[in-house]
Amino acid sequence: MNKVDKKQWFVVGLDILEKDGFARITIDNLCTRLEITKGAFYHHFKNIDGYIDALMKYWLNQNTIQIIEDADKLATAKERMEFIGSVVINRSHKSEQVIRAWSFSNQIVKKYIQQVDDLRIDYSTKLRVQLGMSEEESKNTSVLEYAIFVGIQQLYPDINKKDLEQLYIFYCQKLQINGVK
């Protein structure tokens, strides 16, 4: 029998989300993928809702909190914005697309999506203020930019890195033309 640590449960869960969708997040499917018994599942989690909560907490940390912490290690707001942009371009968004769809039918997931969205928009707003924009303009720009990001995920779920990068560069150039630097 395999010994599985908590992180492996989450890595497998995110892989299932990306490849098979949220309907496949079941105790049986997780245990089959990890080649372990259901008893091992219950050693770590009380029930499937406990697992989903822990999985979403892991996803929140890996895909938002850790990225913000890494960005904050950089010297300037401009460098932090550029870092965030490179993360957006270089990461797979498939699991996030599935998680967003899942949030419409699962209250646990919905709670985490809201936290992620709020953290990302607030951080972007903070950086824009540091770059000299007013609070209102920063918030509005951050909300619109984030809506574009989420919209691209939904409209073009299989967009490749090159096309996403070209859209990002185009967007940044348009911002500079309109007086945002």
Image (cartoon, rainbow, N blue to C red):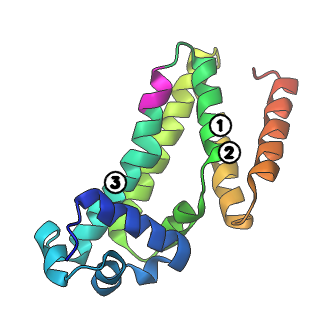
Give the image location of residue 26, x and y in percent.
Answer: 33, 82
Q: Residue at x 75, y 57 (%)?
A: 160
Q: Is residue 131 above or below residue 101?
A: above
Query: Callout 3, which amino acid?
Result: Tyr
**Which residue is nearer to you in this view: 37 or 179?**
37
Residue at 74% in and 51% down:
161
> In this figure, which residue is indicated by the disc labeled 3?
58
Can residue 128 be spotted in the picture?
Answer: yes
With 23 as the anchor, is 97 left or right in this view? right
Is 89 rendered above or below residue 157?
A: above
Q: Is residue 72 magenta?
A: yes
Residue under label 2:
89
Where is residue 5 shown, x and y percent of the image?
A: 23, 60
Nearer to us in this view, 75 or 100: 75
Q: How far apart are labels 3 and 1 at the CA level? A: 21 Å
User: How far apart are the alpha carbons under marks 3 and 2?
Assistant: 21 Å
Residue nearer the viewer, 29 or 58:
29
Residue 111 lies, in percent from the top left, at 36, 59
Near-viewer residue (168 or 107): 168
